[in-house]
Each structure stands twice: as C-alpha cells, then as structure tokens.
Amino acid sequence: MFEPLEPGGGVLPDWGRWRNAANLLLCTAGAVGVALGGWALSDTYRTHQDREASRTLITRACAGLVDAGTVMELDGGADRVVLGGEGPDPGTVGLDALPGRCVLHRLEDRDGRDLRLSQFTLTLQALPRERALHTVGDSRQEPFSTLRLGSRDEVTARTRTPGRPPLGDGRLGDYGPADVTVVARCEQPALDGMTSLVVTAAAPGTRQEAGDRPRLARLARQAAERAAAEFGCRTRLPGLPERLPAPVAELGPVGERSDSCAWYAAHVRTADSGRLPDRAAGVPLTGGAREESCLLAVGREATERVFPTLSPDERARLDLNGILWTSPWWVRTRTYYGEDAAAVAVEVRGTHSPDPLVPGRAGRLGDVLHGSMTCDGRPATLTMTVPYRYRSVLGPRLDELFKAYATDAATRRGCTGPVLPAAQ
C-alpha cells in the first residue's frame, strides 16, 4: 500500500542520522512557532477586545465628556477598565443634574487574580451650590504624616497636602499632585441658575504624577468645554499653560519670598519670631487665582528651642515627643475669591456637618479663624487653621498673624472693608 522509506528510493530522502534529527527538530520548532503565533494572535485579539470594550464603557460612564483613549493612557496605560462606583453609586455621571461624577478602575492580573486599582475620576459641580465646595479645618486634611520613632526625618519637612498652584494666571483653575480643576464661568446664568461649572479630573492612584498631569489638564478642560455646552453655559476657556510644575510639598526656610507666604516673610522681619513658624511652603501668586494658600510650620530645632521657654503649666499640657513625631505646630491660610468665597465651610470636630461661612462675617470655629473683605466688588473669604495645641502656644500672637495675613491680601488685591475676628 505504501512504499517503504529506504535510502535513495523512498518517498523522503535519507540524509543521514544527524541531518534527519536536525530536520525533525526544525519541523517541531515550526509547529511550536505556529502554536505560539496562534496564541499570541489570540491574546492580541483579546486585548484589542478588552480595550474596545473599555473605551465604550468610559464614553458611556463619563457621558462622552472625555477622550476614552487618553483616560486609558493614565498611569502607564490600562487594557481593562471597569466602573468603580460603590453601593448605590454606579460611578457614572449624568447630564440631567449636578453634582455628578464618573469613577473608573483598572483591572490588573496579579498571580491569576484581578486587582482593582483607581484609574480616573471626573467630578462636575456647579456654582452657586447649597453645600460647600471647599472645607477647611477637616482633620483628614492634616498637613503632616506621623513619623516612626527612630526615624531621621522631620515631620514638618514635607507636607502630604500641598497648596494648589493656579493654572496659568488662575482664571482657568488650579491643580494638585494628581488632579486638575478647570472652572468654566458662564457669560450668563445657565441651567438651574448655574454661573460657573467646576470640573475636576483626577487619577487618584497614579504612580506617574508628572507625566499624567498634562493629560489630566487636557481631560478637565475638554470635559468643562463639552459639559458647558450641554448645560447652556456660554464660556471662553483660556488655553492650558505649557508647564505644570509639581506643587511645592517641601517646606523651606521663610527667608525672602515672592509666593503666597510672602506676607509671613514680611511679618517676621519686623516681629519677634520667638514662637512663630520658621518653615513655609506656598504657591505662585497670580491675579486670577480663585484660591491662595500658605502652609507654615515649626521645625524640630525651633521646637526644641521654644519648648523649654514655655511656662510650667504650658509644658505640662504639651508633650515634646508628641510634637516632634506626631503633632507638630503649624498654621495654614486659605483665601477664596469671588464665587468660591461663598462656598466655604468649616469642619468642627464632633459636629455632624460643616458650618458654612457667610461672606461679610468673621469669627472662630473650632481650629479656624475666618474673616472677609471685598475685592474688585466681589467677596473674599479668609481662613487661618491652627490646631489647638499650637494656638495655646501662640496666644495673642495669633491675632497679630491673622491681621498681617489679611492686610497683605487687601493691599495686594485692592480689597476693601476687611472684617476680622475679634481679638482674644
């Protein structure tokens, strides 16, 4: 039926034992290559399908306000994206009412299991609004992390909540380490009396902060422009700046400053700085910023120098090790201008909800002193947060600090009618 494979006369030639073995190896390798090629092709197809499904999901979840491909490029790139809402929150944004947000997570294969990581969050809010847009005095916003005993670091060397630099001259918005906020100001009141649309694009878990910041800026501006059109908010958004330097997280010597802590640098040049902060971190000053902040703190050496000068009663109430490792002395100012001035609230520990601040008034709430003034015919709200453990050390110097802070803001931005908290 079949002829035998014999040397020289068979169906296949006999090249000798070694060449036959080599041919067999080549055939086997070819078969394996075909199999691997098929697997790779199948894997590439699955990845393509995952990416297409993820793009569709992003477009639907974020109401078509952002480019899905750019969202997937965040944090080094993602192939599989799913909704990240919890409980009754589906994680999708609607254009029927505000506020709203879409929340997206990425799926990564870790040892055969899908690990969910934050990928992108888009938040839309409107001004004016019933609930506060900005909250101060919140214990979750403590500027410094606790150090381990034995650490060589200083607790006040770096803040975990740096101030928000302005986007360009500030008219467009501001940004943080892993988020960008764009404000679209309506030429005329839009749907439901909206006068401004506030859009924040964030990559909460990003490991590529610097590279993602420009992408987030483009996404935030794109979403603000598209959402404004949907809500009937006619607006003209400034262009994005070419560079978005990292927010300043390291606190340095007060020295000579031109940033938002310049008021403090001027103050300590003419005041007794004995118990006052010796470190500062600010943000660039611009004429159009809706928020300005300055963080001040007392370093280790200054703390160790001041502590022995306190009265016996003061030292009894305070713990030097606690100050150095977990509860440092610090002061933070935040000033809000225009519509944002009427959207500020103070978080007082032990209360159920933040207390809104009313422009034109001043006082003290929890750890926060607050005041107000009028700048270019629009309100401004001034806040100074000082933890109790440091307020007791500053005493009457605290009122001097607030006055210096308010006086600088009024002079620099041409504000009138300052209202300050009563001295204590």
Image (spheres, rainbow, N blue to C red):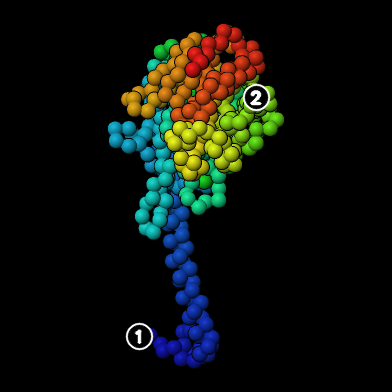
In the rendered structure, the answer to whether residue 384 lies left or right of residue 59 reads: right
Instruction: Decide: is 76 above or below 27.
Output: above
Query: How far apart are the two marked residues, 2 and 1, measured between alpha carbons?
Result: 112 Å
Position of residue 87 measured from the top left corner of the image (x, y, whole percent):
29, 35
Residue 133 numbered tag: none
Q: Seen in the image, is 203 located left or right of residue 110?
A: right
SS at mark 2 in the image = loop
Residue 353: tell me if it is visible: yes
Q: Where is residue 162 in the image (x, y as percent from the top left)?
A: 55, 34
Q: Quadrant of residue 351?
A: top left
Amino acid type indicated by mark 2: Ala
Percent from the top left, x then y, of residue 280? 61, 33
Q: Could you tell me which secondary element the residue under label 1 belongs to?
A: loop
In the picture shown, does residue 138 fall above or below 35?
above
Q: Residue 271 carries which label?
A: 2
Q: Is residue 139 above or below residue 154?
A: above
Is 343 above or below relative to 244?
above
| Amino acid at dot 1 | Met
The residue at the point 56 percent across, 41 percent down is: 304
Residue lying at the far front in this picture: please name it. Answer: 312
Label annotation for residue 1: 1
Q: Describe residue 273's horizontal placement relative to residue 110 as left or right.
A: right
